[in-house]
């Protein structure tokens, strides 16, 4: 076993990289990908330069961590595109919409009927039936302001 | 060199474990809370998330999708002391993951208990009849109260629905009997109403028929009277014309008519098929007298004709009693 590994030399890293990436694809969970990428880079470097296997391993460990951090940083700057960014964010989906008050806003609190349920709202004192626009949300309480009428 | 080899291998294991511990993939619909030394620091949203191994760890994995809680059947005593069994469902959604994680222990059980106690409160304040007919109001009141209470847990209760309201058996029977009696009553009233209406319509028809018949008779009588009037008028005019004719002519002319009618009447009597005995209440001499009168008229007429023929044939003939008036 050890002899085979020694005989293969730096190629062992590229074989490992391929195997890890195959694993990743077969069992997605984003665990093997980092190691696969690190093995790939280590293999390429080991092919180019003569490095002791221990240092190759240290390279591999460091690169695994660096890959994770780099990918994370990249994703933070370029978030994954989705056509439903507000999925599972019920309150955020209501922001910008205009609704009618079903209870007047008194002492800063009232309620509107939106999305087939009743939401409590916070805003300036307004009578029942007034139109309000949702500007933000704090948990299940919507922040509203009087709706601007074009008239 | 041997020690270094072992160190390198240990390092490999450490890094593999570290990377696995640091990378957290949060699936869509979930939020993970991150605790640093046991204290909440931030929330991981769906996608790739990184935490610092050893000091950070994932605290709670919160389901951010709308969830449903089945409210088990429970007994509720209404305001009018009827005992009913009620069950329902509540829908809720976590809007604020950290609050739902740390403000309440066992969120689902908390919502369930809150809903159950409020069902008792709301339904206990209503009469049975209202309970059965105004589910919308019950749902609305429950939602308002429960949603208010769950707000501090970062949870939005979107709906609470009462599924089944089941009054006790004997009460259901009584209700069925009441409904049947109600319907029987309505049927009886409707039948009576129908009969009354039919009787009224029939009487109305008879009345109308009688009125129309009377009106017909009245009209007929009116027209009869008019006919008689017209007849009398015609008679009067005829008589006037005859008497005028007589006045301007000879009185003997009247005798001609009388004699004419007399003879006609005699003829009719004689011709009657079953006439075995002819009574003659008339004096034959009178008839003969009449005939004599006629002869006198004729004579006079002929004498006049001969005297008038000579002067001028174009001169108009004076009207005399000899001419026969048309009646």
Image: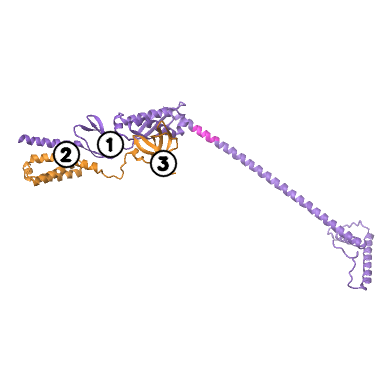
Q: Nearer the viewer, mark 3 or mark 1?
A: 3
> In the drawing, what numbered circle is on residue A148?
3
Please state the extent of the stretch shown in magenta in the rendering. Answer: B176-185
Say which residue label 2 marks: A65
Same chain for marks 2 and 1? no
Say which residue label 1 marks: B31
- Relative placement, left or right, of A3 versus B288 is left
Q: SS of the residue at dot 1?
A: strand
Q: Is residue A50 highlighted in magenta?
A: no
How many marks can you see? Answer: 3
- Marks 3 and 1 sit apart, C-alpha to C-alpha, by 35 Å
Same chain for marks 2 and 3? yes
- Relative placement, left or right, of B227 versus B134 is right
Task: Tell me which residue sits at (66%, 45%) in the image.
Answer: B205
Q: Which residue is nearer to you in this view: B232 or B35?
A: B35
Quadrant where the C terminus of chain B sits is: bottom right
Visible residue check, residue B140? yes
Q: Which residue is nearer to you in this view: B299 or B61?
A: B61
In the rendered view, would you say B131 is above or below B309?
A: above
- Relative placement, left or right, of B206 versus B301 is left
Chain letter for the residue marked with disc 1 in the picture: B
In the rendered view, would you say B276 is above or below B190?
A: below
Chain letter for the residue marked with disc 3 in the picture: A
- Marks 2 and 1 sit apart, C-alpha to C-alpha, by 24 Å
Measured from the top left, where is residue B5 in percent x and y? 7, 36
């Amino acid at each position: 076993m050890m002899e085979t590994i020694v005989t293969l030399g730096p190629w062992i890293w590229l074989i490992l990289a391929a195997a890890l990436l195959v694993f990743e694809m077969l069992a997605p969970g984003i665990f093997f990908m980092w190691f696969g990428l690190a093995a790939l880079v280590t293999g390429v470097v080991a092919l180019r330069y003569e490095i002791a296997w221990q240092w190759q391993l240290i390279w591999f460990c460091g690169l695994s961590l660096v890959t994770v951090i780099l990918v994370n940083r990249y994703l933070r700057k370029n978030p994954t595109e989705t056509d439903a960014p507000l999925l599972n964010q019920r309150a955020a989906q209501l922001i910008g919409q205009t609704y009618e008050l079903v209870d007047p806003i008194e002492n800063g609190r009232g309620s509107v009927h939106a999305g087939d349920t009743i939401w409590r709202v916070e805003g300036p004192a307004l009578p029942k039936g007034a139109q309000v626009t949702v500007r933000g949300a704090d948990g299940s309480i919507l922040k509203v302001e009087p709706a601007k009428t074009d008239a | 060199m041997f020690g270094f080899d072992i160190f390198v291998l240990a390092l490999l294991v450490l890094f593999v474990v570290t990377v696995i511990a640091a990378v957290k993939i949060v699936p869509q619909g979930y939020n993970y809370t991150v605790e640093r030394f046991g204290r909440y620091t931030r929330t991981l949203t769906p996608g790739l998330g990184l935490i610092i191994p050893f000091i950070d760890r994932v605290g709670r994995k919160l389901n951010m999708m709308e969830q449903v809680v089945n409210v088990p059947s429970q007994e509720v005593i209404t305001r009018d002391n009827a005992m009913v069994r009620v069950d329902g469902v509540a829908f809720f959604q976590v809007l604020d993951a950290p609050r739902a994680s740390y403000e309440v222990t066992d969120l689902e059980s908390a919502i369930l208990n809150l809903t159950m106690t409020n069902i008792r409160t709301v339904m206990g304040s209503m009469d049975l009849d209202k309970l059965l007919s105004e589910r919308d109001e019950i749902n609305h009141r429950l939602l308002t109260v429960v949603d208010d209470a769950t707000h501090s847990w970062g949870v939005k209760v979107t709906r609470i629905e009462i599924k089944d309201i089941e009054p006790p058996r004997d009460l259901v029977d009584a209700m069925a009997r009441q409904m049947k009696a109600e319907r029987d009553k309505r049927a009886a009233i409707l039948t009576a109403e129908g009969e009354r209406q039919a009787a009224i319509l029939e009487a109305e028809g008879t009345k109308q028929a009688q009125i129309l018949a009377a009106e017909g008779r009245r009209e007929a009588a009116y027209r009869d009277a008019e006919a008689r009037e017209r007849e009398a008028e015609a008679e009067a005019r005829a008589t006037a014309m005859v008497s005028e004719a007589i006045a301007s002519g000879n009185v003997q002319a009247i005798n001609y008519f009388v004699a004419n009618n007399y003879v006609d009447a005699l003829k009719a009597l004689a011709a009657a098929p079953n006439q075995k005995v002819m009574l003659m209440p008339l004096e034959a001499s009178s008839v003969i007298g009449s005939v004599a009168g006629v002869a006198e008229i004729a004579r006079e007429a002929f004498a006049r004709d001969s005297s008038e023929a000579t002067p001028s044939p174009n001169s108009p003939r004076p009207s005399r009693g000899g001419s026969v008036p048309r009646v």
